[in-house]
Structures are given as C-alpha cells and as structure tokens.
Image: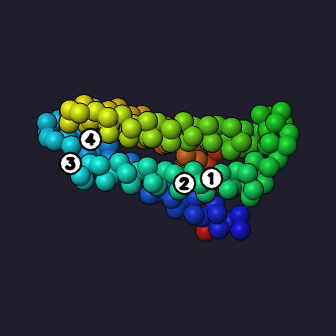
Amino acid sequence: MYSSALWLHSLLRWAVLITGLVAWVRAIGGKTGNRPWTPKDELWGLLLTISADLQLLVGLVLYIFLSPITRLGVRNFAAAMQSDAARFFTVEHPAAMIITIALIHVARVKIRKAGDPQRKHRIAVVMFGIAMILIVIAIPWPFMPPPFVSRPLLHR
C-alpha cells in the first residue's frame, strides 16, 4: 500500500508541475501580450488547483498513515530533527507544500475577484510563479547532493 501511494504521489508531482507551468506561462503571455483573461486561462488555473489538491490528499495519506519515515518523525520529533531525511519528510516538505497549495487557492480567489484582465494575469504571474518556485524547491529531486534528500523521478 505504501509503495502504491508513493508511486501515485510521485506521478501526481508531474501533473502539478505541468499544470502549474502551463498556467504560469499563460499568465505571463496574457500579461505581456495584453490579452483578456480567457476560459483557457481559467481552466489551467482550475487544473492546477485540482492536481495540487489531489497531491495534497495522497500526501496526507502517506504522512498520516503509510510513511514509516513520518511515523518515526512524529513519534520522536527531536530525533527527526537530527536526520536530514526525517526532518525533510516530517516538516520541510509538508510545510512548503501546504503553503504552496494555500497560495494556489488564494490566487484563484483573487483572480476570480479581480475585474481587470491585466490584474488577473498579474496575480497569476506572481502567485503561480511563487507557488511553482516553492514546489520545485520542496521536491526531493534525484540529482540533489547530500545533505539534501533525493528520490527517483518516478517511483516504481
């Protein structure tokens, strides 16, 4: 069960990255091209939100029920803070991702409330951009050198 959830979490990472990148690039194009906010812009923001929420759901299942790393980290928090991997998966990764998902949701609300298309694009550029930076930083990429935590691009 743990390996299946980890595989799904790893796969969903790509959905979040792709939808986030497309939403952000569309916002940049809309801002620089001075074009109106379109249904496609709205769709890509929605797809980003959905993929991020699904990722959060699978991540919470891993964190609360399945991960032996977080189970030990929560059980002995002081010891977890001494281990790079335990600290990363118990505190750093979930905190960064929860902040990111909150940022995506706040962006969507602000975009909906903004009347001016240029303001919508500006909000999306800034907030989706910050979210994407946080996501990229908080992913345990396989090429990360020690003491950073690394994982394969796609778990099997």
For badge 1, the amino acid type reads Gly
Q: Give the class, few, some or many, for how many residues have Cα within 10 Å of label 1's Cα (few <14, many ≥20).
A: many
> Label 1 belongs to which residue?
59
Provide the secondary structure element on which disc 2 rests: helix
Q: Which residue occupies 38% across, 48% down?
A: 20
> Label 2 belongs to which residue?
55
Quarter holding the N terminus? bottom right
The Cα–Cα distance between marks 4 and 3, rounded to whole angstroms, is: 10 Å
Q: Give the class, few, some or many, for how many residues have Cα within 10 Å of label 4's Cα (few <14, many ≥20).
A: many
Provide the secondary structure element on which disc 1 rests: helix
> Label 4 belongs to which residue?
27
For badge 2, the amino acid type reads Gln
Q: Position of residue 60 (x, y in %)?
A: 65, 51
Instruction: Determine the image quadrant of residue 90.
Output: top right
Instruction: Determine the image quadrant of residue 28.
Output: top left
Provide the secondary structure element on which disc 4 rests: helix
Instruction: Determine the image quadrant of residue 18.
Output: bottom left
Q: Are marks 2 and 1 in contact (CB under 8 Å)?
A: yes
